[in-house]
Amino acid sequence: MWNKNERDGNVDQAKGKVKQAVGDLAGNDKLKAEGKVDETVGKAKTAVGGTQKKVGAAIENLGKVVKR
């Protein structure tokens, strides 16, 4: 299951790719640049979300070990 950052990151990446494609077709360099920024921000958000998930799982596992 995706967390909020992963979901938002994937949306931003898709939005960025669409903007880049539209900017390329329209010859709009500003829109292409915005798309690249959106895609990069999306990748960062997705990475943060993945890290959050891993840290959460590690904390859960630690709690189970301590409970024993």
Image (cartoon, rainbow, N blue to C red):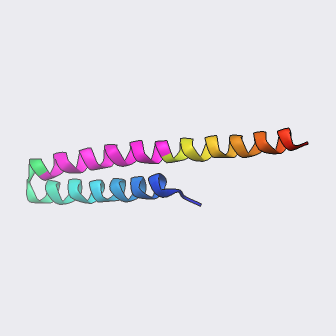
**Residue 68 percent coordinates (x, y):** 91, 42
Which of these two is toward me, 68 or 26?
68
Q: Is residue 37 left or right of residue 67?
A: left
Q: What percent of the width, then of the height, locates residue 1? A: 59, 61
Q: Nearer the viewer, residue 35 or 57?
A: 57
Q: Can you say whether 8 is above or below 39 in the image?
A: below
The residue closer to the viewer here, 1 or 19, is 1
For image coordinates 40% across by 52% down, the residue present is 9
Residue 4 on the magenta segment: no
Residue 23: image quadrant is: bottom left
| x 78%, y 43%: residue | 63
Question: Is residue 15 placed above or below 61 in the rendered structure?
Answer: below
Q: Start and end of the magenta stretch?
A: 31-48
Residue 40 appears left or right of 50 = left
Q: Main secondary structure of the magenta part?
A: helix
Please state if 33 lies on the left or on the right of 61 as rendered.
Answer: left
**Exactly how many numbered labels are in the figure?**
0
- Residue at the farthest front position: 67
Q: In this rendering, would 18 be left or right of 26?
A: right
Q: Residue at x 47, y 57 (%)?
A: 4
- In the rendered image, residue 45, in percent from the top left (x then y), is placed at 41, 46
Q: Residue at x 34, y 55 (%)?
A: 12
Q: Is residue 42 magenta?
A: yes
